[in-house]
């Protein structure tokens, strides 16, 4: 039979009182390290600069003209259609005004 003395019991109680908070602190630290390891990398605030070894693209004069022409052509076509529509609207408006006033307006192109 083993007997425990009051000194042994006091030592065990003191050991538990110290060891338990240390265990908790170790577990919290371990959990913090695991969470920090799993977090995504922070995004850089500034874009990374282009290394100077890579040549910068040069715009050839012919390429710029072709691109400008490709953009300008539909715009020019739209302007021409707009002019045609405006002329047709003006002619229609004049025909309506003439019809309201009782005047006969000859049709265009005839």
Image: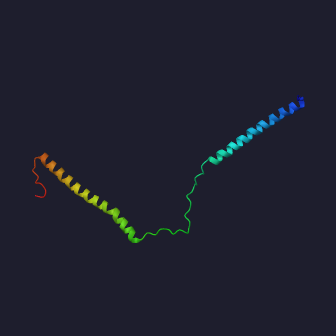
Q: How many marks?
A: 0
Please give left or right for residue 68 compared with residue 92 in the image: right
In the picture shown, does residue 88 fall above or below 12? below
In the picture shown, does residue 81 fall above or below 29? below
Quadrant where the image shows the N terminus: top right
Pick whichever, 103 or 27, lies toward us: 27
Pick whichever, 42 or 2, lies toward us: 2
Pick whichever, 55 or 96, lies toward us: 55
Please give left or right for residue 105 compared with residue 88 in the image: left
Residue 92 spot, x, y in % from top left: 17, 51
Location of residue 77 by image quarter: bottom left
Question: Looking at the image, what colour scheme do you see?
Answer: rainbow
Pick whichever, 100 or 72, lies toward us: 72
Residue reaching furthest front? 1
Quadrant where the image shows the C terminus: bottom left
Please give left or right for residue 84 compared with residue 49 in the image: left
Please give left or right for residue 94 compared with residue 50 in the image: left
Residue shown at 74% from the left, 38% from the top: 24
Residue 47 spot, x, y in % from top left: 55, 58
Residue shown at 60% from the left, 49% from the top: 40
Residue shown at 65% from the left, 44% from the top: 35
Residue shown at 89% from the left, 31% from the top: 7
Residue 46 spot, x, y in % from top left: 57, 57
Residue 107 spot, x, y in % from top left: 12, 54
């Amino acid at each position: 039979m083993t007997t425990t003395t009051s000194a042994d019991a006091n030592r065990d109680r003191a050991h538990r009182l110290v060891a338990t908070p240390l265990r908790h602190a170790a577990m919290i630290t371990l959990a913090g390290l695991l969470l920090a390891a799993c977090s995504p990398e922070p995004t850089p605030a500034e874009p990374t600069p282009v290394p100077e070894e890579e040549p910068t693209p040069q715009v050839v004069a012919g390429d710029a003209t072709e691109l400008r022409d490709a953009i300008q052509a539909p715009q020019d076509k739209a302007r021409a259609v707009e002019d045609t529509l405006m002329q047709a609207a003006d002619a229609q408006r004049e025909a309506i005004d003439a019809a309201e006033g009782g005047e006969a307006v000859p049709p265009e192109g005839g």
